[in-house]
Image: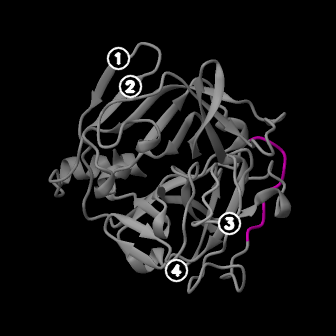
Amino acid sequence: MNKILFFLSSFLGALESYGQEKPVLVFDMLSGAMDTIPVASYDTSISSDRTDYFTGSFSAPTAVLEQTPPASNTYPNSDFTYKKRASIDFDLNQYPLRTSVKLFFVQNDTLADLCSGSLISRKHVLTAAHCVLDINTNTVFLDSIKVCPVYDNGIFSTQFNACAVRKIYFFKDWSIGNGEDFAVLELEEPIGESTGWISIGFNELDDDLSNGIFYKFTYPAAYIPFIDPNPYNGDTLYYNYGITDMLSPNSIEIKNASGITGESGSSLIKVINDQEYTSYGVLSFSYNLKHSRIRNWQFYA
């Protein structure tokens, strides 16, 4: 569908906006080379779009996720739950849980906690730019990154392979304050063929994003008692869900909710069972679970 729209916009002269758009930089983890992808053109009359999701070739059934707002265990004056161990309520080998990944970096030949992410294609992971780059710079500060699906209780999955990152895509001169905190990691192997992947999307209508149920699957990795009384060490998959209630052009937030180190880069996924599993943003700030919101120019880039 997107290719058709691009074709029509090119030939029919639809308006294209380049005011705030930025080119994409591509960093090769092996060679250290940096390439540039020019600013993408797109049809500005389109108010929403999303890629296709894929449930994967693995045989476990799709998880049935709650579709009504939570009535308990929620943040104060919020319709979003506190974090809970995902394995208590789900088989982690089920879709879409298995598309959520733990990110490690290698330090002195040892894996160290990094962030959370989501598979969005057979070999691409969506996460936050600040997980892999110095804040608001084009500088990658890591030598190697490992992506691990269905990592839980400190144990690597026996069903799904961990995989190294080959390339990092991000917006040139990105700004975390402007909602540009996005990175896409290209993997060395197409592990998404087995796990499946979620879609990514944008929607300019706040009402569409303040209605419906959103899920988060994350790897919190710190004990910060004044934010959350529970100790986390990054070795276990957690989830929470509910309704978003604070939206701006650059962000989607949940009032009175909070995140923990290690959850950065996790997706805010709108779920309609067997119909939609779409990330509309990634976690950038702890306070109010503030997510950078995917906008039209970022989506098409």
Looking at the image, which is closer to me, 270 or 5? 270
> How many C-alpha atoms fall within 10 Å of the one at disc 4: few (<14), some, or many (≥20)?
few
Is 35 placed left or right of 255 in the picture?
left
Residue 59 in the magenta stretch? The answer is yes
> How many C-alpha atoms fall within 10 Å of the one at disc 1: few (<14), some, or many (≥20)?
few
At x 63%, y 63%, the residue is 225
Depicted 23 relative to depicted 290: above or below: above
Residue 33 position within the rendered picture, expressed as x and y whole percent measured from the top left: 35, 17
What type is the residue that disc 3 sits on? Pro
User: How much space separates mark 3 and mark 1, taking CA atoms?
Assistant: 43 Å
Marks 2 and 1, the one that precedes in the sequence? 2
Residue 208 position within the rendered picture, expressed as x and y whole percent measured from the top left: 45, 76
User: Which residues, given as a range, are shown in magenta?
Assistant: 57-65
> How many C-alpha atoms fall within 10 Å of the one at disc 2: few (<14), some, or many (≥20)?
many
- Look at the image and tell me in which quarter the C terminus lies: top left
Marks 3 and 4, the one that precedes in the sequence? 4
What type is the residue that disc 2 sits on? Phe
Marks 3 and 2, the one that precedes in the sequence? 2
Which element carries disc 3, helix, strand or loop? Answer: loop
What type is the residue that disc 1 sits on? Ala
Which element carries disc 4, helix, strand or loop? Answer: loop
